Image (cartoon, rainbow, N blue to C red):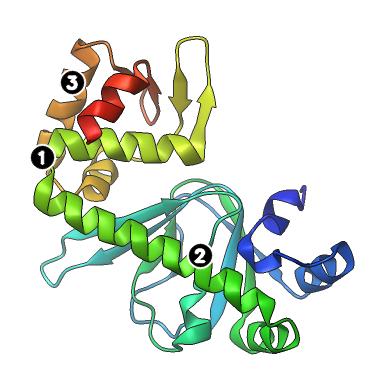
């Protein structure tokens, strides 16, 4: 497997090649099949992960069993870095959306590395800040945006991670079920499907199972505002 994707994570920022390779050698690859759970909400937060391949979803479950997806992450992104700054129970469940490979770094090794390379902490804090900003935007969308607007925004966000240019537009292989996409948007499956059907009838998107082709980005961006 090409290590370039893993080495693009904020964890390796400002390191030379020797240092980056040295840290990578201390990390353990973890292979996951779709549906495998990496850790559950409430588990000890004692390691950081970098995604080398595939997709990982982070979600929370309410007391009545309902699930909300906080985010879907892809290659080169990392999660679990909160344990460095605030060790404690996991605040979400991480599970694989597709066959995936993650590299894990234990908390003790991470702390030792950050102490030896203080600038790494700045990049980790930057990654946390970006995730917090995204969470704040999601909360605002739940209050101020209607479901079709949230669906449009979710599709555009997924396209920045998993989109590939095609002759017709951008093909986004998100690998999410209809229920998972609804959980990501924060609405019922029926309401999200209705919004997608409307977008398709307008010629903005074309659905292809667990993928979607974005045919009119301008219209989607205007609808997402």
Residue 119 in percent (x, y) is at: 68, 77
Q: CA distance from mark 2 to mark 1?
A: 28 Å
Displayed quadrant of residue 93: bottom left
Q: Eyeballing the image, is 1 above or below 191?
A: below
Residue 78 % position (x, y): 55, 62
In the rendered image, is residue 184 in sight? yes
What is the number of the mark on residue 197?
3
Q: Is residue 36 left or right of residue 195?
A: right
Label 1 CA crowd tier, 10 Å (few <14, some 14–19, many 20+): few
> Which residue, given by chain and number where applicable, does mark 2 sit on?
127
Contact, mark 3 vs mark 1 (Cβ under 8 Å): no
Is residue 138 shown above or below 117?
above
Instruction: Identify the residue at image location x=51%, y=73%.
Output: 125
Secondary structure at badge 3 equals: helix
Q: CA distance from mark 3 to mark 1?
A: 16 Å
- Say which mark, if any, is on residue 119: none
Give the CA distance from mark 3 to mark 2.
Answer: 35 Å
Q: Where is residue 25 drawn, in percent x and y? A: 80, 70
CB within 8 Å, label 2 to label 1: no
Residue 167 left/right relative to 119: left
Q: Which quadrant of the structure image shows residue 197? A: top left
Q: Is the residue marked by circle 3 packed among few (<14), some (14-19), or many (20+) residues within 10 Å?
A: some
Mark 2 neighbour density, 10 Å: few (under 14) some (14–19) many (20 or more): many
The quarter in which the C terminus is drawn is top left
Q: Horizontally, is 175 left or right of 198 in the view?
A: right
Give the answer, above or below, for where 86 lies relative to 172: below
Circle nearer the N terminus (3, 1): 1
From the image, tell me which residue sits under label 1.
146
């Amino acid at each position: 497997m090409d290590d370039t994707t893993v080495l693009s994570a904020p964890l390796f920022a400002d390191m030379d090649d020797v240092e980056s390779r040295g840290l990578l050698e201390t990390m353990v690859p973890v292979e996951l099949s779709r549906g495998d759970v990496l850790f559950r909400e409430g588990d000890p937060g004692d390691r950081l992960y970098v995604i080398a391949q595939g997709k990982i979803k982070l979600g929370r479950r309410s007391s009545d069993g309902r699930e909300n997806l906080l985010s879907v992450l892809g290659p080169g992104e990392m999660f679990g870095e909160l344990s460095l700054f605030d060790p404690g129970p996991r605040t979400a469940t991480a599970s694989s959306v597709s066959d995936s490979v993650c590299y894990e770094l234990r908390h003790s090794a991470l702390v030792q590395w950050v102490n030896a390379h203080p600038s790494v902490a700045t990049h980790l804090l930057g990654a946390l800040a970006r995730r917090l900003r995204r969470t704040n935007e999601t909360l605002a969308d739940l209050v101020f945006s209607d479901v079709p607007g949230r669906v449009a925004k979710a599709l555009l966000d997924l396209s920045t991670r998993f989109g590939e240019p095609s002759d017709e537009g951008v093909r986004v292989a998100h690998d999410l079920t209809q229920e998972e996409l609804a959980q990501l948007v924060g609405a019922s499956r029926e309401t999200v499907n209705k919004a997608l059907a409307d977008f398709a009838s307008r010629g903005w998107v074309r659905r292809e199972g667990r993928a979607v082709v974005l045919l009119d980005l301008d219209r989607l961006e205007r609808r997402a505002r």
